Image (spheres, rainbow, N blue to C red):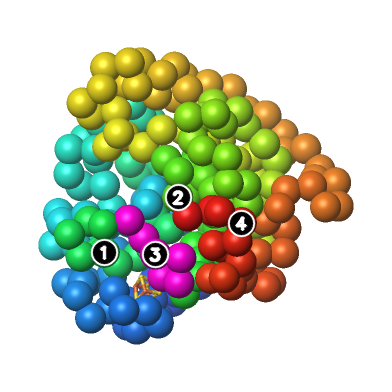
Amino acid sequence: MAAVAAASRSDELEALHASVSNCTACRLAETRNQVVFGSGNPAAELMFVGEAPGFHEDQQGLPFVGAAGKLLERLLAGIGLARDDVFIGNVLKCRPPGNRDPLADEIEACQNHLFRQIELIQPRVVATLGNFATKLLSGNPTGITRVHGREQNVRLGRSEVLLYPIYHPAAALYTQAMLGVLEEDFRRLPELLGREAAPVEPGEGATAEIAAEPIASEAVTQLGLF
Ligand code: SF4
C-alpha cells in the first residue's frame, strides 16, 4: 500500500512538473530559457531547497549544475549520498535576470509550487540553502548566519518536516571559513535523517498556514523576510 501511495505521489510530481513547465505567473517567464523544476528522488527523505536557477541551470533545465552544484555533490558524497538519493529544488523555478535576488512578488507567485513539491515528496528533512529558502520556509526573518545548523520542526502544508538551515554552497565556494561551517553542518544530516519527526504544537512554526494561504507580497515585505 505504501509503495502504491509513493508511486501515485511520484506520478503527481511528474504531473506538477509538466504543469509548472508552462507557468507564466510572474515576470521571470519572459526572460527564462526554461523552468527548472528540480530533480532527484521523488520519494527522497532529504530535500534541498536553494534560491533560484542561475545561468547554467537555466540553460540545462536542472538545478545546481554549476560550481555550487559540484560542491553540493562533494558534500553529499562525504555523507554517503548521491544526487539521485535526494531531491534538489529552489524557491524560484525560473532564473532572475543577471542572477539578481528574487523579488517578494516573485516568491509569492512561485511558493505554492515548492509547497506542493514538499507535500508530494514528503521528505523527512528539508535542508534550506541560504537566506531565501530559510526565511520562506521558517517564516522567520532571522538570517542564515544566526540560524544555520539549528534544526526545527515545522509544518509545511500537510507535511511535518525537520527544517535544517545551512549555508548556500555558492556562498562557501570562495570562503574557506564558510566552507568549514557548511561541511560541519552537513555532517549532522545522517543523524537528522535517523530522527523521528516530533509532533508540531499548534502555532509552532510560522509557516503552518503558508500552503493553505500563501504569504502576500506586502506581508513578505512587512515581515522583513526579503
Ligand atoms: Fe512561474 Fe515560478 Fe517561473 Fe515565476 S518563477 S514564472 S511563478 S515557475
- Name the residue at 33% across, 26% down: 75
Residue at mark 3 to residue at mark 1: CA–CA distance? 9 Å
Taking the image in four quarters, ligand 1 sits in the one at bottom left
Tell me the element at label 4. Answer: helix
Residue at mark 2 to residue at mark 3: CA–CA distance? 10 Å
Work out whether mark 3 precedes mark 4 in sequence or the reverse, and give the earlier one: 3
Mark 2 Cα shell of 10 Å, populated few (<14), some (14-19), many (≥20): many
Callout 2: CB less than 8 Å from ligand 1: no
Circle 2 residue: 132
In this view, the residue in front, 16 or 55, is 55
Picture disc at residue 223:
4
Work out whether mark 4 precedes mark 1 in sequence or the reverse, and give the earlier one: 1
Q: Is 211 on the left-hand or right-hand side of 60?
A: right
Tell me the element at label 3. Answer: loop
- Residue 105 is covered by the magenta coloring: yes
Callout 3: CB less than 8 Å from ligand 1: no
- Name the residue at 21% across, 35% down: 70
Residue at mark 2 to residue at mark 4: CA–CA distance? 13 Å
Tell me the element at label 1. Answer: loop
Picture disc at residue 103:
3
- Residue 111 is covered by the magenta coloring: no
Instruction: Please name the amino acid that badge 2 sits on.
Output: Phe
Instruction: Please name the amino acid that badge 1 sits on.
Output: Pro
